[in-house]
């Protein structure tokens, strides 16, 4: 299982301009043929992941919006409880887009939305304050990320519950991530390890990487290039000759 942004794809100022590193798609495709399951678990909508991972997408389990929507063998599904929040998300995303100062962008993902301060990091305090107020007003839950805050339906689904579901019944499982939102997946694998499953939690390091993520990882590699090298090495060992 792997996160997308900051793990398979370098972080860029415009979130719409993020692409996986060259080589990622073919290596995921090879791994999907060799391993029991390869999943990409992201805060992005599944449609975005499908576009960015075209060529491998049909062989992957794609989990979007931190587990609120997913696709296996091309069929898209969304969590029923989260669906009820779609109108509240649309209303709050539109309000945020109207009120956001220059330098703050609003990424509307349908079932969630994200306030980004990446092009103006000095606006992060505005983003945090606005997100907290929007959460109080709407009942949505605020989740901090790298120079961003995301508003999501208050349902008990995160990358941890996803990692738990995708690793169920497996003898081995790994998870690659770069941000706070990936920590619950590391925790889920730690619980699996307690059950005798072989697990590996890998952090893609960057100047912004949360120290608690690096501390919780079994292995720390240097950003997306380090992740790609790891996947290539894994593929060389597992792919059929
Ligand atoms: Mg990430």
Image (tube, grey):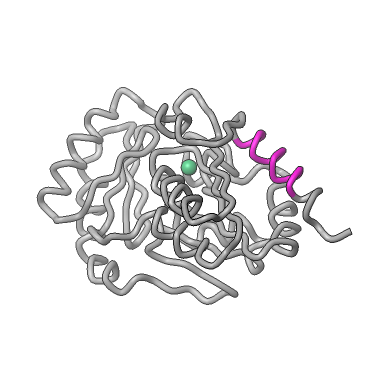
Q: In screen coordinates, is 33 left or right of 124?
A: right
Residue 19 drawn above or below residue 222: below
For the point 68% across and 61% down, which residue is it?
Answer: 56
**Is the C terminus in the top left, top right, bottom left or bottom right quadrant?**
bottom right
Quarter of the image where one finds residue 84: bottom left
Q: 79 or 183: nearer the eye?
A: 183
Query: In the rendering, at what x and y percent does residue 186 appear?
Result: 46, 45
The boundaries of the magenta stretch are: 224-234
Q: 235 or 144: nearer the eye?
A: 235
Instruction: Specify the principal SS of the magenta part.
Output: helix
Query: In the rendering, at what x and y percent does residue 193 appear?
Result: 50, 50
Quarter of the image where one finds residue 39: bottom right
Q: In screen coordinates, is 123 left or right of 41?
A: left
The verdict on residue 12 being magenta is: no
Query: In the rendering, at what x and y percent does residue 151 appear?
Result: 27, 50
Q: Residue furthest left?
A: 137
Residue 36 drawn above or below residue 125: below
For the point 45% across and 60% down, which residue is it?
Answer: 164
Residue 24 drawn above or below residue 70: above
**Is the N terminus in the top left, top right, bottom left or bottom right quadrant?**
bottom right
For the point 47% across and 39% down, which residue is it?
Answer: 14
Quarter of the image where one finds residue 148: top left
For the point 47% across and 57% down, which residue is it?
Answer: 163
């Amino acid at each position: 299982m792997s996160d997308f942004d900051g793990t398979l794809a370098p972080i860029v100022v415009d979130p719409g301009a993020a692409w996986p590193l060259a080589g990622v798609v073919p290596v995921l495709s090879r791994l999907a043929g060799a391993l029991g399951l390869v999943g990409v678990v992201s805060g992005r909508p599944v449609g975005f992941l499908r576009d960015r991972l075209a060529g491998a997408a049909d062989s992957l389990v794609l989990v979007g919006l931190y587990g609120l929507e997913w696709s296996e063998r091309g069929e898209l599904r969304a969590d029923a409880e989260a669906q009820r929040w779609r109108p509240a998300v649309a209303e709050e995303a539109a309000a945020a887009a109207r009120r956001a100062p220059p330098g703050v962008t609003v990424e509307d993902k349908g079932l969630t939305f994200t306030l980004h301060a990446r092009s103006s990091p000095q606006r992060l305090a505005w983003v945090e304050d606005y997100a907290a107020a929007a959460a109080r007003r709407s009942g949505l839950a605020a989740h901090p990320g790298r120079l961003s805050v995301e508003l999501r339906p208050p349902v008990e689904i995160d990358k941890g519950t996803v990692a738990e579901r995708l690793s169920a019944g497996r003898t081995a499982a790994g998870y690659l991530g770069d941000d706070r939102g990936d920590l619950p997946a590391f925790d889920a694998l730690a619980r699996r390890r307690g059950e005798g499953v072989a697990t590996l939690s890998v952090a893609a390091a960057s100047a912004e990487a949360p120290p608690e993520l690096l501390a919780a990882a079994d292995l720390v590699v240097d950003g997306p290039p380090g992740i790609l090298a790891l996947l290539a090495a894994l593929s060389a060992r597992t792919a059929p000759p």
